[in-house]
Structure formats: C-alpha cells, structure tokens
C-alpha cells in the first residue's frame, strides 16, 4: 500500500467534508437569517398597518332603514275632504312596500357585516318595530294600541348575530316616532291598524373576556325641537341614547343619535345644540355615532355638520384628509331597486373628542346583496366602521 497516497487521500477527504460542512452551515445560517428578517419585516409591516390589538377598539354605525317612504304620510293635507281615504291608501302602500323590502333578508346582510368585522360597539338607527291590530279602530292613533309584532328589526338582528356565533346585547335604546294609523289589509279586506315604532340603539359584544368591556349609566332622551302636526295629532320625535364605557383601558361616553332630515335644516341645528348641551356635555371623552342627515359639504342643504365639527373630530376626515368629499354613505333609491342610483352625500358619521385614543381607520361598507331582484341592498345607507387606537399608534 502507498502510505503517502493514502494520507493524501484522507487529507483531501477531510477537506471535502469540512468544505461541505461549511457550505451546509452557511446555507443553514442564511435560511435562519432570511427567516428572521422575514419575521422582523412582517412584524414591522404589521405595526405599520395596525395598532396594538390589545388596546384598539372598533365601532360601527348603520341605519337599518325601515324599507319604505314613511314621509308620504306627512305630505298629506288634513284639510282635504278625502284626507282619511288618502291616508288609508297611503299607509297601505307604505306597509306593503316595507314588507316587499324583505326586512329579514336585509337584516341578515347587516348581521353578516357585523359578524365579519366584530366591532365592540354598534350604533343602529331605524331599528323599527312594526305591529298590527286586526281589525283596527279607524281612528288616528287608535283607541287600542297594536301589539301583534310583524317585524322587530332589533330582535331579528341580535338573533341573526347569535346564529353566526357572535353575541351582542342591547345596552341602551330610545323610542322615537311611535305612530299608529289605519290601513287596508289586502288579504282580508278589513281595515287594520299599522303601528310603526322607530328606535335607535347601542349594541355591545358580550363574548369578550370578563372585565374587558363594561358599560354603565344607560340613558336616552328625545329632542325638544321636533316636527309637530297638531292638526292631525302627529309629531316626529328624534333623539339619542348613550352609555358610559370602559373598554381595554379606555373610558368614554358613547352616544347614538338620529337627527331630523335635511328638509328641516334649522330644526337640525337646534337638535345638534341640544345634543351638545345634553348627553355630549361630559368630562368623559365622547364618541357619537349615528345618522346626522347632514353632509360636510352641505350637499343636502343643511349645516348641522358644522355645529358638531366645531367641537368634535370627524373620524373619516381625520383618517382620510385628502378625501374630505368622499366616504359617501347615502343615496340608494327608496325601493332599493335601481343599481344606477349612486350615493351622493355623507351623512352617517362618527365624531369623537378627548381621550387617550384617536381614529386610526375609517371605512364605508355598502351593504350590497348578491341578487338580481330587489332589494339589491340591505339599506339605503352604508355602514361606517371606525377603529380607534391609543394616541401614537398611527404610523
């Protein structure tokens, strides 16, 4: 055996093994480094696109839309000799228009959106309660109040959420319009009474860890300044409801409201001032979510937005300073049937003031239904979703 050659071969083999080990080590080190860099980069990107999850919170405001043009009743002239006949015909048309809007189907879509977002607090307007009495009294207002529930929008929504495995409770609500009027029952031919109770409400999650979300001091009220029609004994109350909230270390008052329509701009301003001088006058930070019926660019002719903007920050404007004219939330047609009718104003808003938090995200969600026949949307309004985070979390 050639000893020198054998030693040379062994030495070469050792060098090959060492080289292979070095390559393998370097390759492994590179993989580890790449992995660490990827994780670090992902973490940095996550910090740049979302606040600390354990301190942020989210709210949604959405007008559920009754489903019909109830304002047509107010347009009737009580001095007309045919007023009662016209009233019965108008109420009948509105009632069956609401039924045709398929409230249960529409509210399922709202429940889908809430379940997908899982906001901590939800502010809802036009959470209608529709009841009938058969036969009716044919008396304005009815001598016996209708109690047979046809649609309870609030209960349908809460139950629909529960079937999706997300759980909410109504912690504050207010009754606004509560009117009972005669209508023709097209199935029986009798004159029935139809009763519409308009409500606003605040819902909060009930599935959070104990102590993470606490609410107290529920309150509600109606504005003094409202539309009144003494000639027929009708009025159109508007109002608000509120709770004080402790949520992930943040303490604030949360208010849901629904102001009068833009057709009464001076009344809107008076209601805005009532809200500011009433429930919003607090030493606590305040968040107000609702249907303000007032556009920041005055595209609806009203100025109530300016009253709030003088005292509060508008979440959409803060998050989207270059898109002040955007974020449109209202404009689908009355029948939810015309796909060519686009949103033309922003009236669903979230205002806030004070606190150790700020608006970090704000988005508008058009509640479209995946269908070709009306209703094409869950509401004539879009939902507005705002995420709040501790100050300094935004990048």
Image: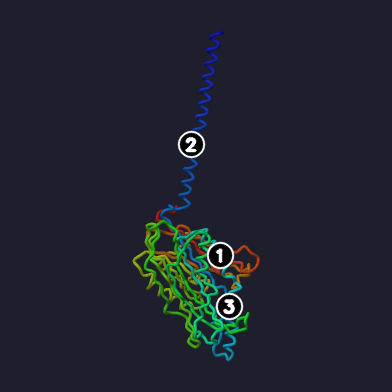
N-terminal of the pair, mark 1 or mark 2, is 2
In the displayed structure, 66 sits above or below 90; it is above
N-terminal of the pair, mark 3 or mark 1, is 3
Q: Which residue is mark 2?
A: 33
The residue most toward the bottom is 81
Circles 3 and 2: CB atoms closer than 8 Å: no
Name which quarter of the figure residue 377 lies in.
bottom right
Q: Which residue is mark 1?
A: 108
Closer to the camera in the image, 134 or 182: 134
Q: Residues within 10 Å of mark 2 (few under 14, many from 20)?
A: few
Disc 3/disc 2 C-alpha distance (Å): 67 Å
In the displayed structure, 216 sits above or below 75; it is above
Q: Taking 147 as reference, is 375 left or right? A: right
Question: Which label sits in the foreground, 1 or 2?
Answer: 1
Count how many numbered circles sit on residues in the image: 3
- Residue at 43% x, 73% y is 272
- Residue at 46% x, 46% y is 44
Q: Residue 247: where, in percent of width, then height? A: 39, 59
Q: Which quadrant, please, contains the N terminus?
A: top right
Q: Which residue is mark 3?
A: 95
Disc 3/disc 1 C-alpha distance (Å): 20 Å
Residue 147 appears in the figure: yes
N-terminal of the pair, mark 3 or mark 2, is 2
Q: Taking 225 as reference, is 334 left or right? A: right
């Amino acid at each position: 055996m050639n000893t020198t050659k054998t030693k040379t071969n062994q030495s070469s083999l050792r060098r090959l093994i060492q080289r292979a080990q070095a390559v393998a080590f370097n390759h492994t080190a590179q993989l580890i480094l790449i992995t660490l860099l990827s994780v670090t980069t992902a973490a940095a990107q996550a910090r740049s696109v979302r606040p600390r999850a354990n301190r942020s919170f989210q709210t949604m405001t959405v007008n559920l839309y009754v489903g019909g043009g109830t304002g047509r009743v107010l347009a009737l002239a009580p001095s007309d000799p045919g007023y009662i006949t016209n009233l019965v015909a108008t109420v009948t048309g509105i009632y069956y228009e609401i039924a045709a809007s398929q409230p249960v189907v529409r509210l399922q879509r709202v429940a889908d959106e809430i379940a997908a977002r899982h906001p901590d607090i939800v502010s809802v307007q036009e959470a209608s309660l529709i009841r009938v009495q058969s036969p009716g009294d044919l008396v304005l207002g009815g001598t016996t109040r209708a109690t047979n529930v046809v649609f309870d929008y609030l209960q349908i929504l809460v139950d629909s959420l529960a079937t999706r495995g997300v759980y909410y409770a109504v912690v504050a609500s207010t009754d606004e319009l509560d009117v009972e009027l005669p209508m023709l029952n097209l199935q029986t031919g009798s004159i029935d009474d139809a009763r519409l109770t308009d409500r606003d409400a605040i819902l909060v999650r009930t599935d959070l860890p104990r102590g993470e979300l606490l609410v107290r001091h529920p309150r509600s009220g109606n504005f003094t300044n409202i539309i009144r029609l003494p000639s027929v004994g009708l009025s159109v109350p508007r109002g608000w409801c509120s709770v004080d909230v402790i949520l992930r270390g943040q303490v604030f008052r949360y208010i849901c409201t629904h102001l009068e329509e833009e057709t009464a701009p001076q009344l809107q301003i008076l209601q805005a001032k009532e809200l500011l001088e009433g429930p919003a006058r607090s030493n606590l930070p305040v968040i107000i979510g609702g249907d303000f019926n007032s556009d920041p660019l005055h595209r609806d002719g009203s100025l109530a937005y300016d009253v709030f903007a003088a005292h509060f920050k508008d979440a959409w404007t803060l998050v989207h300073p270059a898109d002040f004219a955007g974020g449109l939330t209202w404009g689908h047609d009355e029948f939810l049937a015309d796909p060519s009718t686009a949103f033309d104003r922003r009236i669903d808003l979230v205002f806030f003031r004070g606190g150790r938090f700020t608006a970090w995200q704000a988005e508008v969600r058009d509640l479209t239904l995946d269908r070709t026949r009306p209703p094409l949307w869950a509401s004539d309004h879009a939902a507005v979703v705002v995420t709040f985070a501790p100050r300094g979390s935004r990048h």
